[in-house]
Image (tube, rainbow, N blue to C red):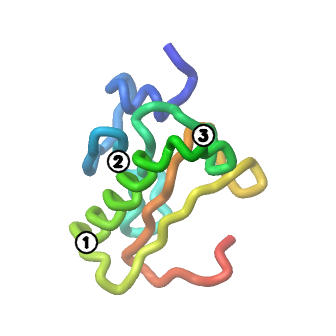
Amino acid sequence: MTDCIFCRVVEGKAPAKRVAETEHVLAFRDIAPQAPTHVLLIPKRRVAESAAHVRDDHAVMLAELFALAARIAHEEGLTRGWRLVTNVGPEAGQSVHHLHFHLLGGRPMRWPPG
């Protein structure tokens, strides 16, 4: 068994409240939400540790991920706005080394973040 919690979620070996999925992407609720809507979107296959490791051949998966994020935001009623965030490295707050994005919404977001 792998140490990657997101890989275990994909395999069904770790619990998660699944929201939606496509051929290459899984979306599920964050266990420690930072906004009323906080959904994680991950590649089903661990193709990269973070955005710093994304390659040209990840384009189809990334397009699917962004389209799924938009669909979920619409389904969640995030009509006033939403944020899609990915963290790269420990100083940015990355704690799971499996490329993932946070879909956040349902409250006003401030700028700059962090």
Would you name the residue on which mark 2 appears?
28
Q: Tell me the kind of residue under disc 1.
A: His
Between 70 and 90, the one nearer to me in the picture: 70
For the residue labelled by badge 1, is the local secondary structure a helix, a strand or a loop? helix
Q: Is residue 49 left or right of residue 105?
A: right
Q: Position of residue 58 (x, y in %)?
A: 50, 44
Q: Is residue 90 left or right of residue 58?
A: right
* Label 3 neighbour load within 10 Å: few <14, some 14-19, many 20+: some
For the C terminus, the image quarter is bottom right
For the residue labelled by badge 2, is the local secondary structure a helix, a strand or a loop? strand
Q: Tell me the kind of residue under disc 2.
A: Phe
Between 9 and 67, the one nearer to me in the picture: 67
* Label 1 neighbour load within 10 Å: few <14, some 14-19, many 20+: few
Q: Position of residue 66 (x, y in %)?
A: 40, 60
The answer to which image quadrant residue 15 occupies is top left
Q: Residue at x 47, y 49 (%)?
A: 59
Would you name the residue on which mark 1 appears?
74
Q: Tell me the kind of residue under disc 3.
A: Val
